[in-house]
Image (spheres, grey):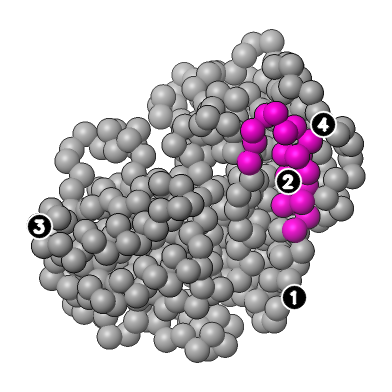
């Protein structure tokens, strides 16, 4: 989703498959195929296989879409069963048994235990469709055009969502004015000593700041594509307070870090805030099937019937797997506790790695099972080299951030410890190779056993 490395497959790479058909027929716009230049043909849990049978540990999870792993057997069984019984696959927004069961399950397993009351809107299948609907609704409710979004924020590639996305490469590709949005500094943007909420407040209170009174604020609690930037709980609470004070709706875009990525189902739960609108997508179906959802407080439901429509709203197969994912993983705290345990394992491992190379100036940041290993001085080339080395050793890992300087550790939440450690070891060896090529020696070298 971020800037995939541009080089095409190098001929001398042993594992390069014949990618000519893609080169010949597919647009230059293709991205991840350049970072991972093999043909994948099987995937189970956290292991991908290419056509030559080579295995890769997956620390990418379809950019956050496969929180429960590839072809999770519990979910796969449900898919097969549903297909076997000729359940509806396509139904526009008509009532179906699969949809009814998903809505009931979502209410029972997610909303009721959290004492949340939200109306559900199923939008087109990808995340950007949910963001478009959320922004449109907020503008309708408040009768204002402007939306506040944040530096390094990422919300999608269509007109409205791109206007609230910060990355210049994506903005330039729009070829038109991206308007009706004002960018404010995210938490920590000016370093730890500057309170960016005070900056926001000042801009809002001053009627001559140049910022039109916004309808809403859209925020990620952890900026996934923007470089694994974590908003503190206090910052989120202060943001909510400012929203209330200035009559702006608070939209939390939980498309990448919702569905358990940070430990709880919604990423904002530990902050104790109550967003007016929430966007979900990616891992919502649990199976990699496209499906998006906007949740909003019932009193915001100003839509006229059919006012925001589309052919693929809701995906019946995805309803089936999504309901099963909720029932399999979210009926109690067990799954959340497991994510917290794995977070500690990953975090300790990465901290140890960083401490092993005090001269290298690496840092770690993240929450839950989205952790970033940050290169010094925004060095995206260095991150790209490490990711390439890791891929050659059998690890799929992606970079993020303004210069792609952050290696993003994003394994499935269900990854077994053994595969998690295997991936971390590959990452560690790749970092070691990169640093030793630069003459940076390890302070303490102890492969295979860190963070346990
Ligand atoms: C936070 C966030 N919002 C929106 C999107 C857009 O989702 P999609 O690519 O499915 O349109 C993404 C995608 O990475 C995302 O991370």
Question: Which mark is drawn over residue 334?
Answer: 1
Task: Name the N-terminal-most of marks 1 and 3.
Answer: 3
**In the depicted view, which residue is nearer to us: 17 or 449?**
449
Looking at the picture, how far across and down is residue 184, in whole percent? 30, 53
Q: Which residue is mark 3?
A: 208
Q: Is residue 240 above or below residue 151?
A: below
Question: Which mark is drawn over residue 351?
Answer: 2
Q: Which residue is mark 4?
A: 443
Over which residues does the magenta segment extend? 344-363
| C-alpha gap between disc 4 and disc 3 | 54 Å
Label 4 Cα crowd, 10 Å radius (few <14 / some 14-19 / many 20+): few
Query: Could you tell whether 53 is left or right of 173 in the image?
Result: right
Looking at the picture, how far across and down is residue 25, in whole percent? 44, 23
**In the depicted view, which residue is nearer to us: 256 or 198?**
198
| C-alpha gap between disc 1 and disc 2 | 26 Å
Q: Main secondary structure of the magenta part?
A: helix
Task: Name the N-terminal-most of marks 4 and 3.
Answer: 3
Marks 3 and 2: CB-CB under 8 Å?
Answer: no
Task: Name the N-terminal-most of marks 3 and 2.
Answer: 3
* Viewer-side label of 4, 1: 4
Label 1 Cα crowd, 10 Å radius (few <14 / some 14-19 / many 20+): few
| C-alpha gap between disc 4 and disc 1 | 38 Å
| C-alpha gap between disc 1 and disc 3 | 51 Å
């Amino acid at each position: 989703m971020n800037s995939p490395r541009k080089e095409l497959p190098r001929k001398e790479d042993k594992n390069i498959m014949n990618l000519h058909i893609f080169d010949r027929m597919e647009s230059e716009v293709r991205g991840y195929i350049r970072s991972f230049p093999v043909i994948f043909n099987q995937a189970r849990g956290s292991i991908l296989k290419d056509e030559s049978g080579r295995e890769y540990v997956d620390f990418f999870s379809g950019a956050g879409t496969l929180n429960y792993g590839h072809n999770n057997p519990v979910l796969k069984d449900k898919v097969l069963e549903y297909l076997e019984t000729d359940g509806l696959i396509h139904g526009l927004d008509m009532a179906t048994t699969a949809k009814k069961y998903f809505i009931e399950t979502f209410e029972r397993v997610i909303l009721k235990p959290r004492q949340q009351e939200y109306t559900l809107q199923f939008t087109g299948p990808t995340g950007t469709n949910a963001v478009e609907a959320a922004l449109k609704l907020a503008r309708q409710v408040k009768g204002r055009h402007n939306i506040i979004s944040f530096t390094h924020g990422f919300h999608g590639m269509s007109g409205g969502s791109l206007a609230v996305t910060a990355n210049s490469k994506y903005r330039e590709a729009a070829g038109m004015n991206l308007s009706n949005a004002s960018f404010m500094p995210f938490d920590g943007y000016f370093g730890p000593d500057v309170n960016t909420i005070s900056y926001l407040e000042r801009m809002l209170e001053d009627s001559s700041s140049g910022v039109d009174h916004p309808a809403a604020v859209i925020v990620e609690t952890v900026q996934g594509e923007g470089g694994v930037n974590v908003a503190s709980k206090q910052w989120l609470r202060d943001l909510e307070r400012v929203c209330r004070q200035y009559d702006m709706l608070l939209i939390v875009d939980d498309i990448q870090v919702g569905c358990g990525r940070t430990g709880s189902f919604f990423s904002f739960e530990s902050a104790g805030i109550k967003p007016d609108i929430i966007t979900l997508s990616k891992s919502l179906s649990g199976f990699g099937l496209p499906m998006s959802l906007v949740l909003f407080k019932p009193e915001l439901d100003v839509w006229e019937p059919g006012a925001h429509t589309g052919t693929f709203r809701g995906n019946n197969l995805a309803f089936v797997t999504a309901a099963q994912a909720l029932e399999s993983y979210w009926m109690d705290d067990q799954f959340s506790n497991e994510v917290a345990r794995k977070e500690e394992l990953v975090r300790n491992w990465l901290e140890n790695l960083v401490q092993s190379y005090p001269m290298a100036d690496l840092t770690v940041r993240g929450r839950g099972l989205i952790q970033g290993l940050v290169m010094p001085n925004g060095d995206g080339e260095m991150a790209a080299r490490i990711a390439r080395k890791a891929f050659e050793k059998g690890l799929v890992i992606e970079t993020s951030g303004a210069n792609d300087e952050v290696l993003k550790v994003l394994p499935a939440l269900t990854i077994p410890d053994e595969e998690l450690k295997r991936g971390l070891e590959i990452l560690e060896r790749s970092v070691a190779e990169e640093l030793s090529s630069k003459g940076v020696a390890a302070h303490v070298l102890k492969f295979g056993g860190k963070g346990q």
